[in-house]
Image: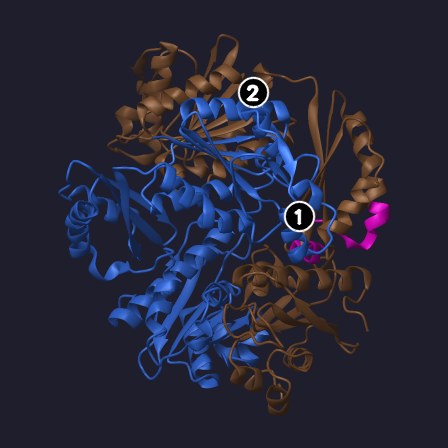
Chain colours: A blue, B brown
Amino acid sequence: MKIEILCVGNELLSGKTLNTNAHYISASLLKKGYETNYISTVSDDQKELLIGIKTAIKRSDVLIITGGLGPTLDDNTKKIVCDFLKIDLKYRDDIAKDIEKRFGQIASIEEQATVPKSGYIFQNEVGTAPGFAFIHASKAIILLPGVPKELEDMFEKHAMIFIQKHFPIEEKVYQEIINITLLEELKVDAILRACQLPKNVILGIYPSHGIVQITITTKEKDRSDAVKTINFVKNQIEKELEDYIFIAKDGKIETAIHNILDKRDETIAFAESCTGGELSSRITKIPGSSKYFLGSFITYSNKLKKDILKVSDKTLKEKGAVSIQTVKEMIKGVFDITDATYAIAISGIAGPTGGSQEKPVGTICLAIAKRSEDIDAGILHLPFTRSLIIKAATNIAFGALFRRIAHNLEYFEK
Amino acid sequence: MKIEILCVGNELLSGKTLNTNAHYISASLLKKGYETNYISTVSDDQKELLIGIKTAIKRSDVLIITGGLGPTLDDNTKKIVCDFLKIDLKYRDDIAKDIEKRFGQIASIEEQATVPKSGYIFQNEVGTAPGFAFIHASKAIILLPGVPKELEDMFEKHAMIFIQKHFPIEEKVYQEIINITLLEELKVDAILRACQLPKNVILGIYPSHGIVQITITTKEKDRSDAVKTINFVKNQIEKELEDYIFIAKDGKIETAIHNILDKRDETIAFAESCTGGELSSRITKIPGSSKYFLGSFITYSNKLKKDILKVSDKTLKEKGAVSIQTVKEMIKGVFDITDATYAIAISGIAGPTGGSQEKPVGTICLAIAKRSEDIDAGILHLPFTRSLIIKAATNIAFGALFRRIAHNLEYFEK
């Protein structure tokens, strides 16, 4: 059985919009054991859309089309698919009333309530454009709106269930992800290469600036067989990588910190310079982080480092804002102002300017500490561009905090 | 002439990796006036890859394939394409020496230096896998590596030039983007609908939580004709939307703020609660923001609101942390601690919990002020989920700050 995602929209072909919908759908399919075989993108143009549909339905059994269901002139998907399937459209008063109830008397109601006479209709609980599904010559064509929120809601509540019901699969894909912090790709790769692998297992390795993800993938008819196979490999990896592993469903290191602090009576606060709020903005994206996150001092100017965090004039003059002494004093400042159990302080040169021979762009001073204990501080050298330096510095700072909180380990060698 | 981008990689079909390569290539093509007609994604599997190539070469004139050029087992692109084109592979000592010179004696040299006997070879100046291009039956097949940095370098230095040389186009696509802040999509849409449009112009409208982008696209043989056509439409839109328009190459509202403050002797500082550092992290991603950005106080806990920003106990108790009075006092705190010319304060309920009937999730109190002038403050109601509430609140806060700085306009009605 083959599944194809066909995305419709000029904005996806002009580099305007990143195709996050295909990404979401394929990830959701995989969670239920389904593989995506093809992803295609075509323009809003009626001819091109028809070419896309014909190409897809020839090679695939389930075709999921996203986009072009709205009320505007360039929204042609419903019409083109119904023409292709020779299904008439019909105005449905009940759908119009449902939209009106939720959105009032909007101009697009008539268009949105005009739907195929046959097939399945998926209610759009978030927006106005309903979705549709058809079984045609033992194949499925599913139409979903392009607005991500609407698509995600409808995919989860209707489309996925429709696929599972009409296209059950015997052999499902099972995938386990292992998240690694603070280890280089090459070191992780060497460990994977030494693993003893059953025939039906594929390993993947995906590094991303301070984080490495390992995927263990297998296909099995029986769930317990899959679990056994995956665990056989997982145990080997876990044995080698132990406390570099963090547990987070979304693969984010801050989520691993959250999962621990959520269950403890401890708190955190940060002092950020070069990361400019990236640490705090990432931690506060997690619902419930207010339980343990007190706040962050984005002391971008030296004056604020002095006025708020009480970094000494002497240190700033003699050692500079990017120095171990400065981040140590920033940590002290955080502990003085807040009641935090743990603190991170970070100051560096994110570039592109501001570097020197002694402290080139990518030089980051980082300190992690638990109140009343020694400060764990050192220097990172991150050979990236500005936004990736900020990303990697944040990942590493969180990685170090995670290992401190979870395993009481220090990051920098004494 | 039709162009297709074919992306190869299991990670793109499993929801693991976002397809940023196709996004980059299509945006780069458009800058040179070329449209992308199709984007497809297939797996590493040899059979599937061949299906992808055959489908693409049938409907397209220029096929750009990315990924699968590396030295590992799942990298099949070079072999499959050469089989398809009936071109033999051959070890090239000069290429091996070039790789060795840059990366030393690595294991993959022999594989990477084994290249097609005919066709064009693109040197990879960033990594080890060369790229290739072939002219086959008046069509082009171009092979590029999948690692974004390598792909981008090679596309710019070789592939784009190859396409322009071998597939020059008479009619080029010209696109102008207009960025709108603080206006709803429907209002922008109404203005676009009232525009007088030349036949060869297509308008696009792309809303994204507080920002709306308008694209004006046309196809012309002559550049000056295109400029004339686009300006005819642009002038109508600009006349209607005036001070809602912001100029930013990357479409980001903070970049518009940067562009102004970069030329002034004024500074900004923030006090953030619910946005948790999103404002500061976005502003500090811009190189050079340290010129005018002093810092931000992420006072997530009420205690920090009191201790740092001197929000009164009375206000927090009587009005609550999410109140106009609180954000006004936060603004005062920012002005007291820093020398900032402008300040933003924001406090709200990002959810999913913490809402009440009186102040449901999505209730955001926002204040913008210029030192010594009246504080512009009010309440936003953002009917989204947590991360989108944070995004929209940030976009609106920046929009209001932009209009204050650029046009001395207030956001909230008195």
Q: Can you say which quadrant of the picture contains the N terminus of chain A?
A: top left
Name the main secondary structure of what is drawn in magenta: helix
Label 1 secondary element: helix
Q: Quadrant of residue B255?
A: bottom right
Farthest residue in the top direction? B137
Q: Quadrant of residue B191?
A: top right
* Residue range of the region highlighted in magenta in the rendering: B238-259
Q: Nearer the viewer, residue B397 or B284?
A: B397
Residue A160: x and y, percent? Answer: 42, 44
Is residue A144 among what the camera can see?
Answer: no
In the displayed structure, B15 sits above or below A363; it is above
The Cα–Cα distance between marks 2 and 1, rounded to whole angstroms, is: 49 Å
Which label belongs to residue A96? 1
For the point 77% across and 61% down, which residue is it? B403
| Residue B163 numbered mark, or none | 2
Q: Based on the picture, tell me whether residue B354 belongs to the magenta stretch.
A: no
